[in-house]
Amino acid sequence: PLLPTSRFKRHSVRCASDRQQLFNRIAPVYDNLNDLLSLGQHRIWKRMAVSWSGAKTGDSLLDLCCGSGDLTFLMSEKAGADGKVIGLDFSKEQLSIASSRQYLLSKACYNNIEWVEGDALDLPFSSGYFDAITMGYGLRNVVDKRRAMQEMFRVLKPGSRVSILDFNKSMQPFTALFQMPLTIKSFSCGKEWMIDNVVVPTATVYGLAKEYRYLKTSIDEFLTGKELEKLALDAGFSYARHYEIGGGLMGNLVAAR
């Protein structure tokens, strides 16, 4: 397998440069804003996503669009000392923070983590290598969702699962009405005024109002649960199920190869 040989390795990234630069800029306050805007609930949802992945002791695991590493660290705890975990992201600043957290947390099992700056559309790994994959708040930000799903299918072992946590684009009027921006990468399409009057003012305190207004433009591009299931099945997965969580505000796609 084409695995990184150092703790932090770079591969070519062909993503939209503006998105890459945006997440580099928000990296220093990413975790603080996630906690603030979700009231800490994102940590519960991330544990659920890892549980749905089926990751276990000794596995080789991949966390795509890993950001500052929340899901990666949880996957590391599942894999244990005998396992291997790769955290991949297109933002070198996010990866730098993730690597620093790995050092500061200094948990024994976290030695099984390696960080890779790479492209979710062109994964630098051999086919059929990973036992499970997670992706938290990343699918909506890739420039080609179909290609990203195909790449996840390619690098997964037969019978293994991918677990993708993201915003739930509800088609129910009641849910859509009260949807709120719950993480930096997950914004509501139900009430734009929440972004303008809650998220942007909060981001302004951190000097990031422009970045949050930019992210709002990606909302309309996201997929419903049914569309996500179809996306996975079209990519070759034999099973796909989208679960609504957090009162229907969030969603988690589970797909088996």
Image (cartoon, rainbow, N blue to C red):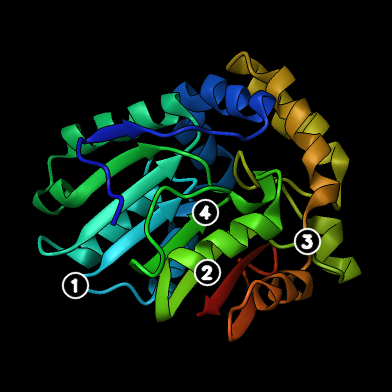
Name which of mark 3 and mark 1 comes first in the sequence. 1
What amino acid is found at the position of numbered circle 1 in the picture? Thr
257 or 29, nearer to the observer? 257
Between 192 and 97, the residue placed more toward the observer is: 97
Q: Could you say which quadrant of the image residue 215 lies in?
A: top right
Say whether disc 2 or disc 1 marks the residue closer to the N-terminus. 1
Query: What residue is drawn where x is 45% and y is 22%?
Result: 28
- Residue in the foreground of this view, choosing between 186 and 33: 186
Rendered position, 81 above or below 238? above
- Quadrant in the picture for residue 4: top left
Q: Secondary structure beneath disc 3?
A: loop
The outermost residue toward the top is: 207
Coordinates of residue 70 in the picture (x, y in percent): 38, 48
Residue 136, disc: 4
Quadrant of the snapshot with the N terminus? bottom left
Label 2 and label 1: CA atoms lie apart by 21 Å
Marks 3 and 4, how far apart at CA: 15 Å
Q: Amino acid at mark 3?
A: Leu
